[in-house]
Image: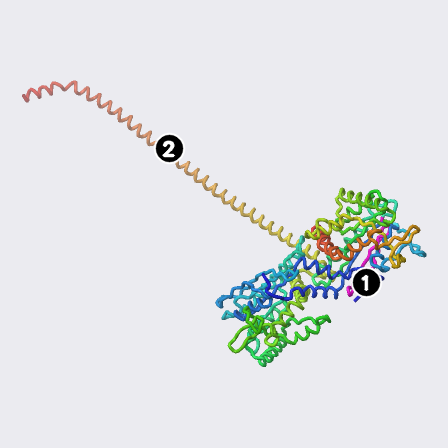
């Protein structure tokens, strides 16, 4: 039908914004990778605050645990009136043992447990107005910067987990690779992922319209992002920037010419955060639910 | 509000302040659904008001007064304003208040609202479901049109609103309000509100908990029920053309706040509270319906030993029960079938026996008769044989006698001569 004049339907957008700002957001991210790849530093850089405690701080005698343990830490952060409850799940011990068989099992179990918790709340007769969401919305997988190919552990893990959660692979500590090595490494990784039919985020199957597809295609070309994390500021050209100071120069974390951290941050937070949550809720959670209700 | 979690302070710009925008962008792409139910007597101005509210011409033919029962007619339209796509469904009650006996007038309405909840519940309970692409048909707001009598609410109004107030957001409206004068109007409004309160009818109150809208919502709550006038015609006033109704004694302008509350209604319904109406429908009315329905179906949250029972286990138990019931029924039917077959077999056997005996009896009779006939035949043959013998003897005697008597006959002949 044609509208002959102004009605005010678009005011519903503002109403929605106000409502969501009041209720706040939840975001749960998991970081997986061997110890020493810079996971905690990366999370701290992403959220510009001391979200995770680093294992390499002096005075901390934290040994590498004998099995994979999962540690979740929840904080509340606020920006521009938007409140976010951020939960970061770390996986110390992953890939650190001599025999790493089935080291992904505790992680899969944890992810499924969160789905189970949500399912139980959802099928109650008297259910809460807002079901607490502890489901993992994104899993950042840290690939060591060998420069060669994906290792069997990487392939096994990503194959299994990309079926139940959004996996975002990144090349950790990318400041050990030159730009050419980086490009070749990425190429090989992309081929490996394709050969083994591993669909990482953003998955091709869930592109909703041509605009989405175009945007996500550009992102898919650059996956995995080569990132460097830093939480110390240094003086460069009169500005204070986050970076790593070495004898041969300062690596600026937020400089797109130095590393791809800005791309990762934009993907995870600025443009696709809601999309990560939606795919977790509409796709991964639903398929868990189908499996669960079918198996009994 | 922070549930005991530490608040961290950010040392720089992270960027998740754009989250509401991301969410809004997604919702805009999906589009919005809004469903309005208009209840009111035939001719109270429902369609005209809806046309005026949405500033368009929905093709809705006027209905007659002679319908035997209340029916609901739903029509869905797609409206677009800038980049917002709205799927608007208008449900009209056709024939409401027209019958002589209005006892069951409200039942079809209640059934319709329940049916929409039921459809959503069924989708939600499915194993393979697609909730995010589901076309939500649940009624978000009910505009109840009160006749502008100027006195009070009718019994039908009270009855209908009472049966609907826990199922849907009700906004009462005085239709065709240009027939009431200003002083009468205020008295009428007060009477209506006090009647609603004394009958315990819970109408929708605009939310006052959010500072951005609480002030205006509180003011508007005081203006309920809205006295509205709708019009599909435009009248030229000064150098503007506005929606209005032209009378010999003046022009009633629809969008003039001094003339009627139309602008207030549009503000409240669309510009300020559309999202809240949708949320109340989902979080309060639908949840209530769901709870009642699931309890009706026999599900519980707490099991017999006061331990929490998951819906899934209850579902399982029910499914198992159902399966056993089916099995039992199947067994029963099978037994019945076997029984019937046996009976039939026995019957057939009996019949077979009967026929067999009859046959044998007949055979016996046949034998007897045959025997009899043979005897008779034999007797007759014997007779024939004797007869032939006698005949032969007689002929013999006769031939002997004729040889000795021919002279006699000659003599006789001579004598005659």
In which quadrant of the rendered image does the N terminus of chain B lie? Answer: bottom right
Q: Give the dominant element type of the magenta stretch: helix, strand or loop.
A: strand
Q: Position of residue B385 (x, y in %)?
A: 29, 26
What is the span of residues highlighted in magenta in the rendered image? A67-94
Q: Chain of mark 2?
A: B
Q: Quadrant of the C terminus of chain B?
A: top left
Disc 1: which residue: A77
x then y, percent, for residue A99: 86, 44
How many numbered marks, from 0 up?
2
| Element type at mark 1 | strand
User: Which image quarter: residue A185?
Assistant: top right
Query: x%, y% of residue B42?
Result: 52, 69
Q: Residue furthest right?
A: A59
Q: Is residue B340 above or below residue B35?
A: above
Q: Is residue A57 left or right of residue B305?
A: right
- Colour scheme shown: rainbow
Residue ranking furthest to the left? B417
Chain ID at mark 1: A
In three-dimensional space, the C-alpha distance between marks 2 and 1, rounded to whole angstroms, equals 122 Å
- Asked if the magenta segment contains residue B365, the reply would be no
Res B19 label: none
Q: Nearer the viewer, residue B255 or B4?
A: B255
Query: In the image, A233: left or right of A155?
Result: right
Q: In this picture, is B13 found above or below B366?
A: below
Quarter of the image where one finds residue B357: top left
Please say whether residue B393 is visible from this viewpoint. yes
On screen, residue A274 versus residue B170, left or right, reads: right
Q: Is residue B378 above or below residue A206?
A: above
Asked whether B403 or B134 is in front, the reply is B134
The residue wearing badge 2 is: B371
The local crowd at label 2, few if under 14, some if 14 to 19, many if 20 or more residues have their Cα within 10 Å, is: few
């Amino acid at each position: 039908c044609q509208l002959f004049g102004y009605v005010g339907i678009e005011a519903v957008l503002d109403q929605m914004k106000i409502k969501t700002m009041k209720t706040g957001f939840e975001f749960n991210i998991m970081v997986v990778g061997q110890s020493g790849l810079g996971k905690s530093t990366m999370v701290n850089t992403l959220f510009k605050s001391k979200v995770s405690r680093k294992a390499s701080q002096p005075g901390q005698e934290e040994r590498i645990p004998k099995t994979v343990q999962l540690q979740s830490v929840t904080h509340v952060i606020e920006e521009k009136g938007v409140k976010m409850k951020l939960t970061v799940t770390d996986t110390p011990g992953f890939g650190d043992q001599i025999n790493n068989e089935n080291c992904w099992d505790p992680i899969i179990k944890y992810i499924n447990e969160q789905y189970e918790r949500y399912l139980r709340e959802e099928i109650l007769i008297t259910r809460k107005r807002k079901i607490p969401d502890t489901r993992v919305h994104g899993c950042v997988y840290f690939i060591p910067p060998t420069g060669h190919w994906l290792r069997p552990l990487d392939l096994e893990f990503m194959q299994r987990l990309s079926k139940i959660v959004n996996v975002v692979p990144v090349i950790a500590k990318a400041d050990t690779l030159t730009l050419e090595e980086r490009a070749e490494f990425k190429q090989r990784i992309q081929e490996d992922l394709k050969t083994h039919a591993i669909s990482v985020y953003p998955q091709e199957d869930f592109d909703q319209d041509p605009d989405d597809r175009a945007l996500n295609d550009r992102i898919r070309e650059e996956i995995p992002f080569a990132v460097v994390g830093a939480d110390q500021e240094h003086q460069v050209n009169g500005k204070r920037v986050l970076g790593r100071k070495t004898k041969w120069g300062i690596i600026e974390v937020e400089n797109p010419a130095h590393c791809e951290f800005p791309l990762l941050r934009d993907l995870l937070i600025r443009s696709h955060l809601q999309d990560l949550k939606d795919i977790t809720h509409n796709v991964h959670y639903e398929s868990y639910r189908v499996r669960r209700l079918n198996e009994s | 509000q922070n549930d005991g979690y530490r608040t961290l302070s950010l040392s720089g710009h992270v960027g998740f302040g754009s989250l509401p925008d991301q969410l809004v962008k997604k919702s805009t792409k999906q589009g919005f659904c809004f469903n309005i139910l208009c209840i009111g007597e035939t001719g109270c101005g429902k369609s005209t008001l809806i046309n005026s509210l949405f500033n368009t011409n929905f093709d809705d033919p006027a209905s007659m007064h002679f319908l035997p029962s209340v029916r609901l007619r739903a029509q869905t339209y797609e409206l677009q304003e800038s980049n917002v796509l709205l799927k608007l469904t208008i449900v009209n009650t056709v024939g409401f208040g027209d019958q002589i006996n209005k006892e069951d007038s409200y039942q079809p309405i209640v059934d319709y609202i329940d049916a929409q909840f039921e459809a959503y519940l069924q989708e939600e309970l499915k194993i393979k479901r697609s909730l995010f692409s589901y076309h939500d048909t649940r009624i978000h707001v009910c505009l109840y049109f009160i006749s502008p009598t100027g006195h009070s609410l009718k019994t039908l109004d009270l009855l209908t609103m009472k049966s609907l107030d826990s199922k849907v957001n009700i906004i009462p409206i005085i239709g065709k309000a240009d027939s009431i004068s200003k002083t009468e109007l205020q008295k009428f409004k007060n009477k209506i509100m006090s009647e609603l309160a004394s009958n315990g009818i819970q109408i929708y109150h605009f939310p006052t908990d959010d500072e951005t809208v609480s002030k205006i919502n509180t003011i508007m709550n005081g203006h309920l029920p809205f006295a509205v006038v709708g019009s599909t015609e435009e009248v030229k006033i000064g150098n503007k053309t506005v929606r209005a109704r032209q009378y010999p004694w003046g022009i009633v302008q629809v969008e003039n706040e001094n003339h009627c509350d139309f602008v207030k209604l549009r503000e409240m319904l669309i510009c300020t509270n559309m999202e809240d109406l949708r949320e109340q429908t989902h979080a309060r009315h639908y949840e209530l319906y769901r709870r009642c329905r699931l309890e009706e179906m026999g599900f519980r949250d707490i099991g017999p030993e006061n331990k929490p029972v998951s819906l899934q286990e209850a579902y399982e138990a029910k499914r198992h029960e159902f399966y056993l019931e089916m099995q039992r029924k199947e067994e029963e039917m099978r037994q019945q079938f076997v029984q019937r077959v046996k009976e039939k077999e026995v019957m057939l056997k009996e019949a077979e026996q009967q026929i067999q005996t009859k046959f044998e009896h007949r055979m016996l009779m046949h034998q007897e008769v045959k025997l009899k006939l043979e005897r008779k035949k034999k007797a007759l043959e014997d007779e024939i044989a004797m007869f032939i013998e006698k005949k032969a003897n007689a002929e013999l005697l006769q031939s002997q006698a004729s040889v000795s008597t021919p002279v006699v006959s000659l003599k006789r002949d001579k004598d005659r001569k």
